[in-house]
């Protein structure tokens, strides 16, 4: 009898212990059948980011072609730490006070703005660039995760949200052109981007104005998967490409189209950048002068990582004001170093000073160099801000364009310094030139 009681007590202890263990396990188990639930972040990483974002050429490794633009890795070992409470390289997002992911605040989380195609991003191209948009459920799942504090551990979002598997989409509706009395519209009409390719094109459009006009606002619009849209003028109007003809930068085999590349060396920057859906307004009283029938080169670049054709299409509205309202005419900056060389198999940094011969206010900066360029920096030369770094670009194909929130005021004799680092991986000396095998060193922008 004693042995029976002892055995009974031991069995009860075992059962209680098993029950307690089961209760502990159940905190990590789904209610619908005992399967272990995954952390919400793990779902985002494994089922969304890894499949759609941490891919070759995008956010997969530091060797991706676009890495130096965004400095964002989204593979499983880096993504969380690279997103949560991290300031983006995106200048517009920084100005607006956004971070990549702000726990509890989806409106100030850049990630959500970049993936939600229902409202075109005001912070550059929507993501995944060139790929299939995320589903409505995936976007909502990420939104809810951010609102719940963006934790790395814990199941905080209902997985049933992911059942809304309709792909996020929004019909592309071209914006209306300004009234004839208010400005004019130029366009790159629809063209095809083949599967698993990228395509960069130019079109020389002749402005329709029959008298001189002054433009104080530029609005741009592009289809999804457009990496950049830029408006150029020409330095030499005797060397213009044919009007209204679509010109490709790359040949079908991926090599550079030498004719188009040579035409690019005649460009003067007039507006645009990596945000293809944006509006830029010149400071009050400042406008860009456009002479009658001016040749303007429109440039767009699209990515297509899907298995079907995509369409490219871009528009630019140029809004005008009366000359009576123009106090200052916006002038183009075109500071170039045309006398430099980079020895074979060497890395070299070239520093060049440029000065203005009058008092100016600089409002926009961008840069131009070729494929051997690693970094293009611009610093202020002279005055109270002497030596201040105001611009840095690491992508020769898609140079950063900065519309300065704090304009740079310079006196006559003061100016800008370019600090450009090249890595000449060829076995020959490379100097300034117009071909794809040569190099360049130019500051573009606006001042008044």
Image (cartoon, grey):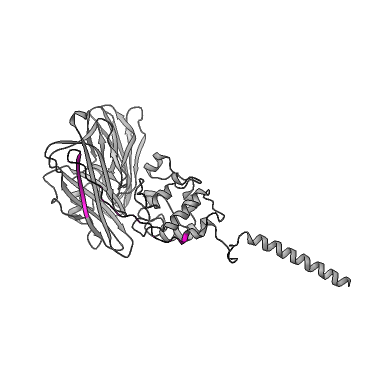
Residue at position x 74%, y 66% from top?
Answer: 15
Residue occupying the point 22% across, 60% down: 251
Residue 359 in view here:
yes
Residue in view at x 21 percent, y 37 percent = 320
Q: Main secondary structure of the magenta part?
A: loop
Q: Position of residue 278 (x, y in %)?
A: 31, 44
Against 408, residue 270 (above or below) is below
**Residue 140 quadrant:** bottom left
- Residue 317: x and y in percent read 23, 43
Q: Nearer the viewer, residue 62 or 114?
A: 114
**70 lies left or right of 85:** left
Q: How many numbered discs, if any?
A: 0
**Which span of residues is magenta-colored?**
162-189
If the image is split into quadrants, where does the C terminus sit?
A: top left
Magenta stretch holds residue 183: yes
Report x, y in % for residue 118: 37, 52
Quarter assignment of residue 280: top left
Give how far across and how far down residue 394 sits, in percent.
34, 47
Along the line of sight, the residue nearer the viewer: 23 or 52: 23
Residue visible at 52% across and 57% down? Answer: 158
Magenta stretch contains residue 89: no
* Placement of the N terminus among the 4 image quadrants: bottom right
Mark yes or no: residue 342 visible: no
């Amino acid at each position: 009898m004693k042995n029976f009681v002892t055995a009974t007590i031991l069995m009860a202890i075992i059962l209680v212990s098993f029950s307690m263990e089961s209760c502990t396990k159940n905190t990590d188990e789904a209610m619908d059948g005992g399967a272990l639930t995954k952390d919400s972040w793990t779902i985002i990483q494994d089922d969304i980011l890894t499949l759609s974002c941490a891919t070759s050429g995008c956010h997969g490794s530091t060797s991706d072609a676009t890495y130096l633009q965004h400095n964002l890795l989204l593979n499983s070992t880096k993504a969380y730490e690279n997103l949560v409470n991290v300031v983006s390289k995106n200048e517009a997002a920084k100005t607006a006070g956004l971070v990549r992911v702000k726990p509890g605040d989806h409106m100030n989380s850049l990630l959500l703005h970049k993936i939600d195609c229902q409202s075109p991003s005001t912070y550059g191209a929507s993501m995944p660039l060139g790929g299939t948009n995320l589903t409505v459920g995936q976007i909502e799942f990420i939104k809810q995760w951010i609102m719940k504090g963006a934790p790395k551990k814990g199941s905080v979002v209902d997985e049933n949200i992911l059942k809304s598997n309709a792909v996020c989409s929004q019909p592309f509706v071209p914006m209306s052109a300004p009234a004839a009395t208010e400005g004019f519209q130029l366009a790159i009409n629809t063209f095809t981007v083949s599967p698993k390719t990228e395509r960069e094109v130019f079109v020389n459009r002749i402005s329709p104005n029959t008298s001189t006009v002054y433009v104080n606002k530029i609005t741009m619009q592009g289809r999804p998967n457009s990496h950049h849209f830029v408006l150029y003028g020409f330095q030499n109007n005797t060397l213009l490409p044919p009007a209204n003809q679509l010109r490709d930068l790359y040949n079908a085999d991926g090599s550079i189209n030498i004719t188009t590349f040579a035409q690019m060396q005649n460009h003067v920057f007039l507006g645009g950048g990596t945000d293809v859906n944006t509006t830029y307004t010149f400071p009050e009283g400042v406008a860009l002068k456009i002479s009658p029938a001016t040749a303007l080169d429109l440039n767009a670049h699209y990515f297509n990582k899907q298995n079907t054709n995509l369409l490219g299409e871009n528009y630019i509205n140029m809004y005008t004001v009366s000359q009576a309202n123009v106090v200052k005419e916006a002038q183009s900056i075109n500071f170039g170093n045309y006398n430099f060389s980079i020895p074979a198999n060497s890395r070299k940094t070239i520093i060049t000073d440029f000065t203005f011969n009058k008092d100016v206010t600089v409002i926009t900066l961008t840069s131009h160099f070729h494929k051997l360029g690693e970094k293009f920096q611009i610093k202020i030369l002279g005055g109270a801000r002497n030596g201040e770094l105001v611009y840095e670009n690491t992508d020769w194909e898609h140079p950063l364009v900065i519309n300065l929130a704090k304009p740079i005021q310079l006196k006559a004799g003061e100016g800008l310094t370019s600090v450009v680092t090249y890595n000449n991986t060829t076995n020959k000396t490379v100097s300034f030139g117009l071909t794809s095998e040569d190099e360049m060193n130019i500051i573009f922008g606006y001042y008044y």
